[in-house]
Image (spheres, rainbow, N blue to C red):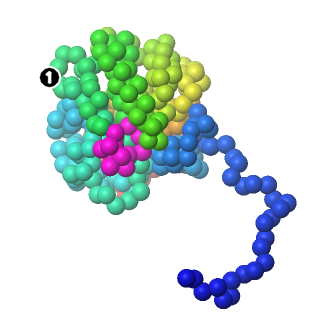
């Protein structure tokens, strides 16, 4: 039994001070989620900026040894200081990423396509919820195909993941895929992001487009912008700046980081935009200074 000697007897209940834990939660659309969901979201979105830098390296699940990701064990660890969230498959995370550290985990849980397929829209929910829990994932990433042949099955995958996520307090991220027949217009993205959010996704990953502010305004949960194909560093930083300045709560610069000639410096420049309010020009100057040191 603890020694009672010297224990303070007088109590201070601060009767004139309002209850402290009564502020709205800072992540869009998450006020009515339970504590566990909010805790996971706080591992994804920085509480000061409200934003996130994601790093997707899940390309191997359908591309094999993607250029720049041949050695995940060498690429990922050196980027960790500039990254908030790692988006990968359970196989890549377990085999190549150090477990130590406090980075958020967006776990890819759908699969079934490859570069050999003409139609990539047919996927299945490939990871069971028990393994998501074992991986201590902060969200489940579900590929969603709106307007494609596999739309029904992908939205079924999303709905099943949302149901399981609600049961075990793990957020779901809907990743809006754009098929070959889809146009990257604001009309499409307003439709796709809203559908995915209405089905219960807590985060939407999608692409930047014209009238992006309208897409953000119409979506009731945070949007993270995908970097997409490899761009010159200056253009990639312009994309990051435009996305954040028009309402995105983060960027996921996969290829625009790991295929850069200077991936560490590029990830640091992206971080300056996302969390420190740098413009694209300021971030590019920062990038240039780093590589010439």
Residue 239, image x, y percentages: 45, 32
Q: Residue at x 42, y 45 (%)?
A: 138
Q: Where is residue 161? Give x, y as percent.
A: 38, 31
Which residue appears at 80% of the width and 64% of the height?
Answer: 14
Residue 217 placement, left or right of 179: right
Q: Residues within 10 Å of mark 1 (few under 14, many from 20)?
A: few
Residue 92 on image: x %, y %: 23, 46
Residue displayed at 29% across by 29% down: 125
In the foreground, 83 or 43: 43
Q: Which residues are magenta?
A: 129-140
Q: Is residue 272 at least partly visible in the picture?
A: no
Residue situated furthest right in the rendering: 16
- Quadrant of the image containing the C terminus: bottom left
Instruction: Tell me if 68 is positioned left or right of 221 in this view.
Output: left
Asked if the stretch drawn in magenta spans residue 217, the answer is: no
Residue 220, placed above or below residue 276:
above
Number of marks present in the image shown: 1
Q: Furthest residue to the left? A: 116
The secondary structure type at the circle numbered 1 is loop
Q: Residue furthest bottom?
A: 5
**Which residue is label 1 attached to?**
116
Quadrant where the N terminus sits is bottom right
Determine the residue positioned at 22% across, 45% down. Answer: 91
| Foreground of the two, 82 or 106 | 106
Is residue 90 visible from the viewing direction of this image? yes
In this rendering, the answer to whether 191 lies above or below 126 is above
x and y percent of residue 193 in the render?
47, 22
């Amino acid at each position: 039994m603890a020694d009672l000697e010297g224990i303070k007897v007088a109590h201070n209940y601060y009767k004139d001070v309002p209850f402290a834990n009564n502020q709205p939660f800072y992540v869009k659309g998450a006020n009515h989620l339970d504590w566990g969901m909010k805790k996971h979201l706080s591992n994804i979105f920085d509480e000061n900026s409200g934003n996130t830098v994601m790093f997707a390296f899940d390309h191997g699940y359908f591309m094999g040894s993607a250029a720049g990701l041949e050695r995940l064990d060498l690429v990922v660890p050196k980027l960790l200081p500039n990254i908030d969230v790692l988006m990968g498959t359970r196989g890549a995370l377990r085999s190549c990423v150090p477990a130590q550290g406090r980075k958020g985990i967006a776990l890819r849980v759908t699969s079934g396509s490859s570069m050999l397929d003409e139609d990539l829209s047919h996927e299945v929910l490939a990871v069971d919820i028990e393994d998501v829990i074992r991986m201590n994932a902060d969200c489940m990433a579900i590929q969603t195909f709106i307007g494609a042949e596999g739309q029904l099955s992908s939205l079924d995958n999303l709905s099943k993941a949302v149901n399981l996520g609600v049961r075990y307090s793990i957020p779901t991220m809907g990743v809006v895929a754009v098929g070959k027949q889809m146009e990257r217009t604001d009309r499409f993205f307003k439709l796709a992001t809203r559908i995915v959010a209405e089905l219960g996704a807590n985060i939407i990953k999608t692409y930047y487009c014209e009238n992006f502010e309208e897409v953000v305004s119409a979506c009731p949960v945070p949007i993270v912008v995908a970097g997409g194909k490899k761009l010159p560093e200056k253009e990639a930083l312009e994309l990051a700046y435009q996305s954040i300045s028009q309402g995105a709560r983060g960027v996921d610069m996969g290829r625009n980081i790991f295929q850069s000639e200077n991936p560490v410096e590029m990830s640091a420049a992206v971080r300056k935009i996302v969390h420190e309010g740098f413009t694209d020009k300021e971030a590019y100057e920062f990038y240039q200074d780093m590589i010439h040191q």
